[in-house]
Each structure stands twice: as structure tokens, then as C-alpha cells.
């Protein structure tokens, strides 16, 4: 079956994202924040700034960005026990939060950030596939909003982000390449991939896993092309969210 013949349960085309919404400044008490929705997946992303760095970085004149990730107990329909109750994080949580941190650090000028740390917290309210990708995409907006706030308050001499970053899932399902898998597609995919890219098309990370059928080079190229198209759309939505928030800032400054 070719991708063009594929009918998805929600009526999407193979190259079509789920409905995406990014609401900036969703958490008023955070330095920067965003609520991102990708279909039924919803993640709150916040950025908190501390005027210090880890001890091993002190005195270098550079900053740091790190991330934490978690899923609320009812986010998957079957209650997920909190990590604090178990007394440890599970391996998946550690893997994802490291991915989020690596992805965002790829676009940060740490010298421009100065000796301060930005903590990015991504909390999944509802999961229907693609939570790590939604976290990265939303965390960028939260980080950018935090940096805009630091600039307004005169704490930064220059903009510390070299570009944008976003992520999207894709995979081979019933022989067809599909973009932005929901849980029902992801759970039966022959190949499952998560792609992180900068806004100018640079690859930050590609995670691809084949189930039952080895991944061919042709399929990998097809998936990367699908992901690039999806990330172009995500970048535009990120910018729209940031532009809308900047307009509110401007109105408040003149009020």
C-alpha cells in the first residue's frame, strides 16, 4: 500500500500533523511557559530561571539549560504511579528529559546567557503519543519567553538563542510512512522515529527503531523528509505563539 492510499482513523493525510495549538504564558507564575496540544496529547512546559549555575560550572561566565519530564498519574487513562512514590525515576523518564535538555541546549549561546540556569519542566497532562516531541516543541516557546523576559529586564546583553528547535514523530505503519503518530498508530508501527530539528533544517537528533522489519535507507530518507515538512509547520506555529505573546508585552508596557 502506498502512503497516498493510506486512510488514517482521524482522516489525516500521511504527511499531516494532528491539530496543534500552542498557548504561551499559560502559567503566570513561571518565567516562561506554554501549553502545547498535539491532537489529544497535552503538555505544560515551563521555564524557571535561577541566578546561579551548577557548582561544576561556576566561574566560567557561562549558563546552563536542563530539563525535567513527568507524566501526571491520569495522563494515560490507567493511573501511573508518581516517581516520588516509587522513590526513583523510571528509565523512560530519564531518557526523555535528557533528550529534551540536549535538544534545547543545541540552540543556546551559553556565554550570552550568563551565569544562570534555566530549568525546563515538561509535565504531560494527557498522552496520546508524541509526548517527548510535544515537550521539546513547547519547551522552546517557554525558553524563548523566559529569554524575552530577561532581555526586557536588562539582564541579558544579547539574545542567547541561535535559532528555534522542534520535534515530531513519524513511522512506518502497515507499510506506509506517516507523520505525527498518535498512540494507536505508534503501538503498531513497524518503524517508530522521533526527529529533532532546528528551524533552519539542522538535525539535532534522530531516534529510529524498527520492529519486525529492518529499516531501509529509502524509508529513513522518506521519514526524514516527512519530519522536515512537519517541523517547518511547527516552527511557524511556535513563532505565531511568540509573536502573540510579544504583542501582549507591548500593550502592557504602554498601558
Image (tube, rainbow, N blue to C red):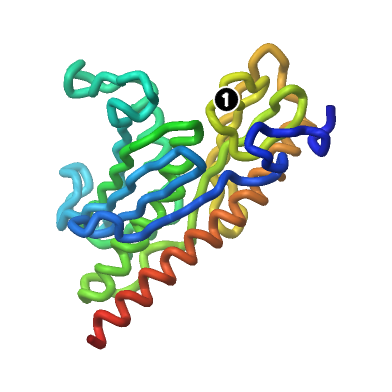
Point out the image quarter for the C terminus: bottom left
Q: Is residue 20 left or right of residue 51?
A: right
- Please tell me whether residue 2 is drawn above or below residue 105 in the rendered image: above
Q: Is residue 66 left or right of residue 135?
A: left
Q: Is residue 76 left or right of residue 203?
A: left
Given residues 64 and 67, the one toward you in this image is 67
Within the image, what quadrant is residue 200 found in? bottom right
Given residues 78 and 66, the one toward you in this image is 78
- Please tell me whether residue 89 is drawn above or below residue 44 in the rendered image: above
Within the image, what quadrant is residue 83 found in? top left
Residue 236, how many percent across, how many down?
A: 55, 62
Task: Identify which residue is drawn at 36% across, 64% down.
Answer: 160
Task: Identify which residue is drawn at 74% across, 22% down.
Answer: 174
Task: Identify which residue is drawn at 39% across, 57% down.
Answer: 23
| Extreme residue in the top direction | 212
| Extreme residue in the bottom direction | 254
Residue under pointer 1:
184
- Please tell me whether residue 43 is drawn above or below residue 246 in the rendered image: above
What is the tally of numbered marks visible in this picture?
A: 1
Q: Secondary structure at mark 1?
A: helix
Residue 140, how many percent across, how many down?
A: 41, 54
Residue 135, how many percent across, how many down?
A: 41, 43
Residue 213, how many percent across, how many down?
A: 72, 15
Task: Identify which residue is drawn at 51% across, 42% down.
Answer: 39
Q: Is residue 20 left or right of residue 225?
A: left
Point out the image quarter for the N terminus: top right
Q: Mark 1, residues whose alpha carbon is within 10 Å: few (<14), some, or many (≥20)? A: few
Given residues 108 and 173, the one toward you in this image is 173
- Please tell me whether residue 188 is drawn above or below residue 133 in the rendered image: above
Amino acid at each position: 500500500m502506498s502512503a497516498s492510499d493510506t486512510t488514517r482513523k482521524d482522516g489525516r493525510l500521511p504527511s499531516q500533523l494532528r491539530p496543534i495549538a500552542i498557548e504561551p504564558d499559560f502559567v503566570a507564575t513561571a518565567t516562561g511557559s506554554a501549553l502545547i496540544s498535539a491532537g489529544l496529547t497535552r503538555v505544560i512546559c515551563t521555564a524557571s530561571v535561577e541566578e546561579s549555575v551548577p557548582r561544576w560550572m561556576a566561574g566560567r561566565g557561562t549558563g546552563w539549560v536542563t530539563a525535567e519530564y513527568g507524566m501526571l498519574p491520569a495522563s494515560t487513562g490507567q493511573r501511573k504511579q508518581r516517581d516520588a512514590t516509587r522513590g526513583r525515576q523510571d528509565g523512560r523518564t530519564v531518557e526523555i528529559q535528557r533528550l529534551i535538555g540536549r535538544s534545547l541546549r543545541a540552540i543556546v549561546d551559553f556565554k550570552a546567557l550568563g551565569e544562570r540556569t534555566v530549568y525546563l519542566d515538561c509535565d504531560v497532562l494527557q498522552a496520546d503519543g508524541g509526548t517527548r516531541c510535544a515537550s521539546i516543541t513547547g519547551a522552546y516557546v517557554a525558553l524563548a519567553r523566559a529569554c524575552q523576559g530577561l532581555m526586557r529586564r536588562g539582564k541579558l546583553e544579547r539574545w542567547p538563542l541561535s535559532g528555534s528547535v522542534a520535534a515530531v514523530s513519524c513511522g512506518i505503519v502497515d507499510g506506509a510512512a506517516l507523520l505525527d503518530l498518535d498512540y494507536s498508530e505508534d503501538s503498531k508501527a513497524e518503524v517508530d522515529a522521533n526527529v529533532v530539528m532546528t528551524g533552519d533544517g539542522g538535525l539535532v537528533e534522530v531516534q529510529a527503531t524498527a520492529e519486525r522489519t529492518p529499516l531501509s535507507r529509502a524509508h529513513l530518507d522518506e521519514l526524514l523528509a516527512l519530519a522536515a515538512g512537519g517541523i517547518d509547520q511547527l516552527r511557524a506555529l511556535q513563532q505565531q505563539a511568540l509573536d502573540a505573546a510579544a504583542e501582549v508585552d507591548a500593550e502592557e508596557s504602554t498601558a
